[in-house]
Amino acid sequence: MKLVMAIIKPFKLDEVREALTSLGLQGLTVSEVKGFGRQKGQTEIYRGAEYSVSFLPKVRVEVVVTDDMAERAVEAIQKAANTGRIGDGKIFAMEIPTAVRIRTGETNAEAL
């Protein structure tokens, strides 16, 4: 099993969710996060005063998938989240040794 985690622009969330559910994935976790990469923040003007925003709003999408589904999930996220501009985000895939469904006690792939 793999945990596929993506940091994306907030307005791309619906497209990413649709892309993942079209693969047959039944659940995912979404968190609002802040961060920066090569963008290094940006300068904003509020009521005539200029100030620097160090952290930009992003969305973290996490989904645990079987090993054979991981590559398709990464590709689906990449296509759906891509705008072609700086700040589109990153995708990470990590090994997950164990998963347990709390309600039933099912483990690993059956728990997904």
Image (cartoon, grey):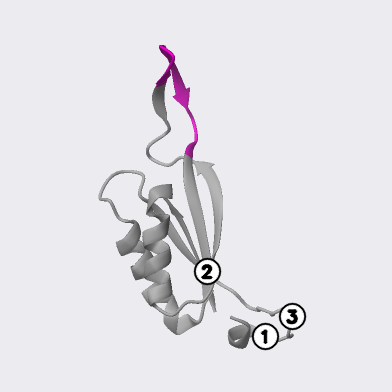
Check if residue 108 falls in the magenta segment. Answer: no
| Residue 52 coordinates in the image, percent (x, y) | 45, 23
Q: CA distance from mark 3 to mark 1?
A: 11 Å
In the drawing, does residue 111 fall left or right of residue 14? right
Image quadrant where one finds the N terminus:
bottom right
The chief SS type of the magenta part is: strand
Q: Residues within 10 Å of mark 2 (few under 14, many from 20)?
A: many
Identify which amino acid the numbered label 1 is placed on.
Answer: Thr
Residue 7 located left or right of residue 82 = right
Which corner quadrant of the image does residue 41 belong to? top left
Q: How many marks?
A: 3
Residue, disc 3? 103
- Kindly identify which residue carries mark 1: 107
Badge nearest the viewer, 2 or 3: 3
Instruction: Kindly identify which numbered label has been placed on residue 63.
Output: 2
Q: Is residue 12 visible?
A: yes
Residue under the image location 43 percent in, 48 percent down: 10
- N-terminal label among 2 and 3: 2
